[in-house]
Amino acid sequence: MAPGIPAAMERPHFIGIGGAGMSGIAQILARRGAKVAGSDAKESGTAEALRALGATVHIGHAAAHLADDASCVVVSSAIRADNPELLRAAELSIPVVHRSDALASLMQGLRAIAVAGTHGKTTTTSMLAVALSELGLDPSYAIGGDLAGPGTNARHGEGDIFVAEADESDRSFQKYDPEVAIVLNAELDHHANYASMEEIYDSFETFVGKIVPGGTLVVSADQSGAVELTRRVRDLASLNIVTYGESETADVRVHKVTPRGLTSEVTVVLNGKYLTFTVSVPGRHYALNAVAALVAGVALGIPAHNLASALGTYTGVKRRLQLKGEAAGVQVIDSYAHHPTEMTADLEAMRGAAADSRLLVVFQPHLFSRTQELGTEMGQALALADASVVLDIYPAREDPIPGITSALIIDAAKAAGADVTAVHDKAAVPEVIAGMAKPGDLVLTMGAGDVTDLGPQILDHLSS
């Protein structure tokens, strides 16, 4: 067995190996010396990056792709029970391991920071990964998005720190035992798995309860769900709680966030002293993410002024207000936002960064269940744009729900006074946007589905 590889992970087979969460774990295992294999629905840069590390990546799902000597089959909650490779694993009596258990096994013996919350996990995890690397601490990390290009969502470092994005969507974050946990916010989402805020609180309480004795919870003092969670876990023995935010009650108080174009300057009060640093992405919510990262690093014993300087080197992650390019005087930016809170935050950030520009949005709703529960709020968020194009719902892993369409969002947007247009053919969007956009405008493609593919196409149309 190679050093650092749990026995069950010596020859893992990943179903859906190209996914953000799965590929990171596969990459770390490959770098530790495991014989990694897997399959994905389509070819991608991520698949190529894994092959470059020695992994075997099949395109398409078939029973024959699963080797008889695989030590385990790794799955996420998105893998359906009738997947042929999963059925073949049962025939061969090969253990099936959830992605979260695989990730938990990689963190064993290391000082883990787990970043949780309904929004902002990827950004905050990325900020920590970049800052700790900049300080020469050589952390390992697993992130739900790419920092720069395919294969940059994870790293096997030689240091003793492991930074992990902790996913609450399927309760898998309850598998981890971090030394430091961050809770950025707690809101109702993932409606297929959570029926109420009470269930959300119960899930987050379990996550917080897994923090190692003497460990630290870093939690927002501003967001109502996080504040309620803090109230519920205040009496947990051997838990240090550090709150952060703009609230006067915060242990680490955000004194001021000053927008400076596509960056922000943040001043915090930490241990009675003022500390100012730069966040190289726009928006108050990203500034607060950086403060959470700062507090978590300090909880591990890293000097605050060193961390603050290193956090300034973070320049963003793919799909988090990522500039895709400029053509004909129009900038095209991509956003992963798909929940109304995220949508509002990113739209307000763009308004603050370019107050004199028109903001045009191409929004693709993600999941029928989310649209059913939050469609009205999504439409209201779009009222922050000067004009919006709304696509059909991206189903991802879900089957359609009768009567649930993008019309729910469009009707709510119009009721809020928004200028919104339905476009059912995604291929028509670049031409539609090119006809709407004028020099100086900002175009924001928004959603967790394949709307991200439209950015380059829109730029091509603007250039022609």
Image: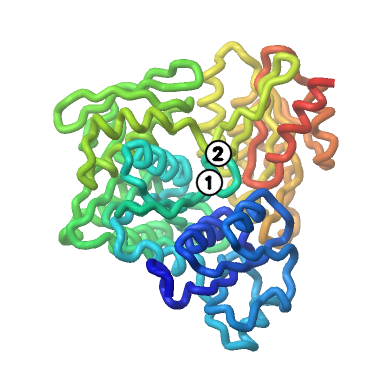
Residue at the image point whose x is 80% and y is 33% from the top = 429
Residue at the image point whose x is 75% and y is 19% from the top = 437
Q: Position of residue 81 (x, y in %)?
A: 65, 76
As helix, strand or loop, the secondary structure at mark 2 comes to loop
In this view, 52 is above or below 413 = below
- On the image, which quarter does residue 388 sit in? top right
Tell me how far mark 1 sits from mark 2, CA to CA.
6 Å
Residue underneath mark 1: 152
**Residue 232 shown left or right of residue 6 in the figure:** left
Check if mark 1's residue and mark 2's residue have beta carbons within 8 Å: yes
**Residue 401 shown left or right of residue 13 in the figure:** right
Regarding residue 418, the answer to whether it shows in the image is: no
Q: Position of residue 455 (x, y in %)?
A: 71, 33
Tag 2: amino acid: Ala
Q: Which mark is residue 148?
A: 2
**Residue 30 shown left or right of residue 308 in the figure:** right
Residue at the image point whose x is 74% and y is 74% from the top = 62
Q: Nearer the viewer, residue 446 or 188?
A: 446
